[in-house]
Amino acid sequence: MTVTETRGPAERAGGHPVLEASGVTMRFGGLLAVNDVSLTVREGEIVGLIGPNGAGKTTFFNCLTGLYKPTGGQVRFAGAPRKPESPKRQQREAAEAVPTQPLTELTPLPPKPRAVVRAGMARTFQNIRLFANMTALENVMVGRYSRTSSGALTSVLRGPKFRREEAATRARSQELLEFVGLGRSTEHLARNMPYGDQRRLEIARALATDPKLILLDEPTAGMNPQETRQASDLIFKIRDSGLSVVVIEHDMRFIFNLCDRVLCLVQGQALIEGTPEEVQSDPRVIEAYIGTGEDEEDDVDVQDAHVQDTTVADEEGRS
Ligand SMILES: Nc1ncnc2c1ncn2[C@@H]1O[C@H](COP(=O)(O)OP(=O)(O)OP(=O)(O)O)[C@@H](O)[C@H]1O
């Protein structure tokens, strides 16, 4: 598979922006963790965020998703924070579906992760955060509750409305487990699931909020090569279902084969943003990894990814 084959439809068609971050800056006391970073994510795009350890990737993510209030800059998202939807409203909205919504300013509002979720942004974390003693299905259902409208009283009374919503939540959660390849693990306790499956489960739970954009923080960390390939296939499938994806990863081969565009951060600043080919062939990127004296593996990865893609492209060119 060449990099160009995996290019998203949005890049070719110039899709509408779903997320615009401009001049995002985040200070922790005297430490400038993110310095004036801008990024636009378009509909149906997969965007990668790379950089050596401590470059500011997770901090930037946290600014995008409302976990941190940036010290400076703006994050705008194409979705309006809104109240939970009633089934009637969902039907009406589906009938009147408007393809693009105006960009909504999420910051410098106070950080409200729940409002961000309702606006259509979901994320996973670097360290898996599942409910260990719940089943896979229950974990996804928890994510789904942000899209249901039952109030506390309805839930306590467990009336017909509650039962209808509960059944719909269960059915949708089951569907999502099947989508991520965990259809047979619905009743497994999260803590007993293999590592790769736990990562998939986190993604299913994030998808349960019906996002337009999903942000994945190191989705392949700790995975074996087969699990990594499966993760890559799953992300393409998510993109093909109409979502945009932003992904932080240290595995360069994974990033360069997956993404439409890549932003490389170094010491809190954007070093380069471009196509995988542009980024992987930029000597500053390789230098940034070597220069830290860390991650010999990352250094090898940058160059290997380049060699691998060239080889595949060459082979295809010959055929
Ligand atoms: N809550 C915090 N308080 C103080 N400093 C922080 C905080 N979070 C991150 N930092 C610092 O900000 C810088 C950027 O950290 P961040 O975790 O965003 O980098 P990263 O690129 O995600 O690194 P890694 O690849 O190791 O996860 C680092 O110097 C880190 O020590």
Image (cartoon, grey):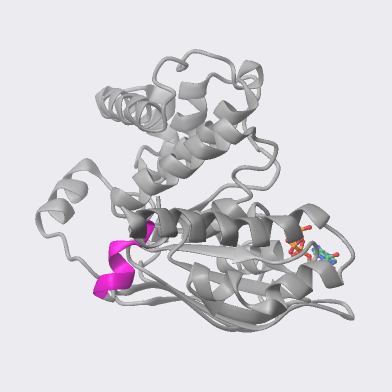
149 in the magenta segment: no
239 vs 121, nearest the viewer: 239
Q: Report if residue 20 is visible in the image.
A: yes
**Is the residue 234 above or below the residue 66 in the image?**
above
> How many discs appear?
0
Query: Which quadrant of the picture is home to ligand 1?
Result: bottom right
- Left/right placement of residue 53 relative to residue 18 reads right
Residue 17: image location, x then y, percent:
36, 74
Q: Residue at x 31, y 52 (%)?
A: 319
Q: Residue at x 28, y 71 (%)?
A: 12
230 vs 199, nearest the viewer: 230
**Is the residue 202 above or below the residue 52 in the image?**
above
Location of residue 135 by image quarter: top right
- Outermost residue toward the front in this view: 318
8 in the magenta segment: yes
288 vs 153, nearest the viewer: 288
Residue 23: image location, x then y, percent:
60, 86
Residue 241: image location, x then y, percent:
29, 48
- Left/right placement of residue 103 relative to residue 309 reads left
- Extent of the magenta region: 6-13
Q: Residue at x 74, y 75 (%)?
A: 266
Residue 49: image location, x then y, percent:
60, 65
- Left/right placement of residue 58 relative to residue 236 reads right
Location of residue 198 by image quarter: top right
Q: Residue at x 45, y 17 (%)?
A: 186
Q: Report if residue 25 is visible in the image.
A: no
Principal secondary structure, stretch drawn in magenta: helix
